[in-house]
Image (spheres, rainbow, N blue to C red):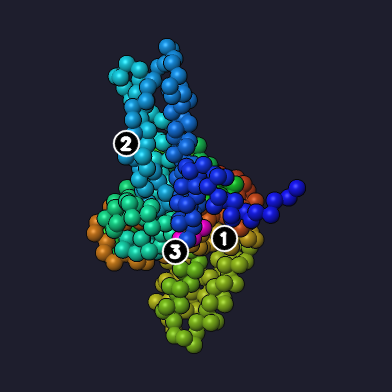
Amino acid sequence: MKSNVPVAEAINDETVLPERVREALGQLIGVAREGLLALSVEVGLGVLRELLEAEVDQVVGLKAKHNPERTAVRHGHEDGEVTLGGRRVAVERPRVRTADGEAEVPLATYEHFAGRDQLEGVVLERMLSGVSTRKYRRVQEPVGEAVEQDARSTSKSAVSRTFVQRTRDLLWKLMNRPLADLRLAVMMLDGIELHGRTNIVALGITTEGDKLALGLWEGSTENAAVAGALLADLVDRGLDVEQGLLFVIDGSKALRKAIRQVFGNDVPVQRCVQHKERNVLDHLPERDRDTVKRRLRQAWQDNDHDIALEQLNTLALELDKPHPGAASSLREGMEETLTVTRLGITGKLKRTLQSTNPCESMISTVRAINRNVKNWSSGEMCLRWTAAGMLEAETRFRKVEGYRGLANLAIAIEHDLTRRRNAATKEPTTTLTM
């Protein structure tokens, strides 16, 4: 026979539910008025309390039950904290000590939820997304007034300390990443200026087409000493200087000099054609730019190295008289704008490696996350923010276009290095005149 008593009335009937259950439900009903998330938080904290007590029973044994082999005993409760999203909230945690009272017995459940990794992760994510330390509390999830009142680690100074420590950890991770087992096909170098300070960054592309942030170095300008220090650091971390490696740079003489100092004269270097195009066009009046741009791109698209080089030389000769500045800019490092073509790389991979766009993309992420920084107080701060941006960009990396041709590139570089080194070791023959 079905009961006609409504469910709500049954719940409110004191004869149906024990007092402890009714009391708990009453508290939950009050929290539920603040929203579903607040209700879920209160339920979750209740479950945590039950899990802690269950672990105590497991370690110590049930209450009021004699156990002569007991190795641990209950030792009351004390105030504790657990991580809840981007804050620390108070909980009452049970304590357990060894039976002889000599040492505290840690509870795995409490240690897991009390860990700060999640808190640091939330702070890092929000700061990198553009949330300032002043507005951090405003983006917190509504977890209930009672919980929020006692929450900690949400003040401006606390968030700042957490972010500084996390970015220091990221900087250490980046600058200590081992490179000995890494098989690189390409390394791209570029500089980023942050309010008068310059960081030179390195991006690697493996033979499988994966992009990887390699490291960075800070200096006052993009000079050869700073770039050389970065490259030397990469070598110290295990990067093989003998492996075939293509360097792609924006045309900076300082970067080119540093590569020569650390890796020698024989390594192939590709100058970014987009930077070269801008440099040449900057010397031309508006009326001549479209024509010169078209001829530059036509030469760089040609897969025959000799024909492409001839086209560029012809263009430079034509520019000599009317625009000598443009001609001089084109001739500077002209052959290195065709390095990829000389190595026989075509198609999508050629377009990818003719410019520093992959590295520029990583740098754009760095600029995006530090757009709200108004005061760069130190070089260490620049390094921390740049490293955090580089590793953030790394999480979004995809394989480079045309990556299937990277194995052929590595072989072509090895052959090119062998040819150049063999040519350099040949002693010129001398003829004696009697």
Q: Please state which of residues 178 and 354 is positioned toward the viewer in this rendering.
A: 178
Give the residue at x 46% y 69%: 276
Q: Which mark is on residue 193?
A: none
Identified by mark 3, the residue type is Ser
Q: Please state which of residues 108 and 226 is positioned toward the viewer in this rendering.
A: 108
Q: Residues within 10 Å of mark 3 (few under 14, many from 20)?
A: some
Q: Earlier in the sequence, mark 1 or mark 2?
A: 2
Q: Is residue 137 above or below residue 97?
A: below
Give the residue at x 40% y 35%: 111
Q: Earlier in the sequence, mark 3 or mark 2?
A: 2
Identified by mark 2, the residue type is Glu
Q: Residues within 10 Å of mark 2 (few under 14, many from 20)?
A: few
Q: Please state which of residues 138 and 59 is positioned toward the viewer in this rendering.
A: 59
Give the residue at x 27% y 61%: 376
Identified by mark 1, the residue type is Thr
Identify the magenta region.
34-38
> Badge 3 is on which residue?
364
Q: Are marks 3 and 2 in contact (CB under 8 Å)?
A: no
Q: Earlier in the sequence, mark 1 or mark 3?
A: 1
| Residue 229, image x, y percentages | 33, 48
State the SS at label 2. strand
| Residue 388, image x, y percentages | 40, 53
| Dot in front, 3 or 2 | 2
> Badge 2 is on which residue?
78
How far apart are the alpha carbons under marks 1 and 2? 60 Å
Overall secondary structure of the magenta section? helix
> Badge 1 is on which residue?
352
Q: Residues within 10 Å of mark 1 (few under 14, many from 20)?
A: some
